[in-house]
Image (cartoon, grey):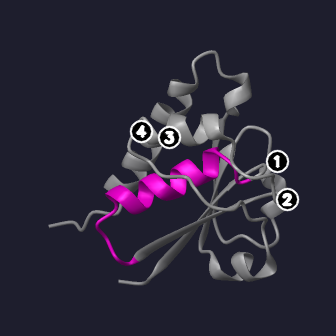
């Protein structure tokens, strides 16, 4: 099977794309799939509240945010736009396949737990599509 490189993208790589990357790495068992995350813009360090929010679900999002680079765009086979505030049209030229999840940032969520649950559900569905067919 061919290796697949998935790039999760949100606006600043502080919460949504980092949760998707970390959770995918936690549950994915298929070694043919690799993931990274980046922000449309390199954001400030992840805030303590978001680290605690993710940790509540067993997800570690510590680390420094990174912005999209030409190296990441060459590396990816699939871009998943985890955010509702990143226009997918900007990847029209460089992306092989773009999927949009349209998830609102934590600051716009009435209950931030729902953001994590929504990302987890979408990552689980994504991983279930990668299980070998018997």
Vertical relation: 46 (above or below) 109: below
Q: Nearer the viewer, residue 69 or 5?
A: 69
Query: Mark 4: which secondary structure?
Result: helix
Pointers 1 and 2 in contact (CB under 8 A)? Answer: yes
Q: Which residues are magenta?
A: 13-32
Distance CA(mark 1)–CA(mark 3): 25 Å
Q: Mark 2 — residue?
A: 90
- Residue for point 57% across, 43% down: 51
Query: Where residue 82 sits: x, y (%)?
Result: 64, 46
Residue 54, which numbered label? Answer: 3
Vertical relation: 13 (above or below) 30: above
Query: Where residue 124 sits: x, y (%)?
Result: 37, 47
Q: Earlier in the sequence, mark 4 or mark 3?
A: 3
- In this rendering, the label closer to the viewer, 2 or 4: 4
Query: Where residue 119 sits: x, y (%)?
Result: 51, 40
Disc 4 residue crowd, few under 14, some 14–19, many 20+, Cα 10 Å: few
Q: Mark 1 — residue?
A: 87
């Amino acid at each position: 099977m061919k290796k697949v490189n998935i790039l999760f993208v949100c606006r600043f790589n502080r919460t949504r794309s980092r949760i998707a990357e970390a959770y995918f790495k936690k549950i994915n068992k298929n070694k043919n799939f690799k993931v990274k995350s980046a922000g449309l813009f390199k954001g400030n360090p992840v805030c303590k509240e978001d680290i605690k929010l993710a940790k509540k679900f067993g997800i570690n999002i510590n680390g420094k945010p990174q912005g999209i680079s030409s190296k990441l765009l060459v590396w990816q086979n699939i871009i998943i736009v985890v955010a509702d505030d990143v226009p997918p049209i900007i990847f029209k030229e460089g992306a092989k396949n773009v999927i949009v999840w349209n998830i609102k940032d934590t600051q716009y969520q009435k209950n931030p737990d729902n953001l994590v649950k929504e990302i987890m559900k979408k990552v689980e569905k994504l991983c279930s599509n990668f299980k070998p067919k018997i």
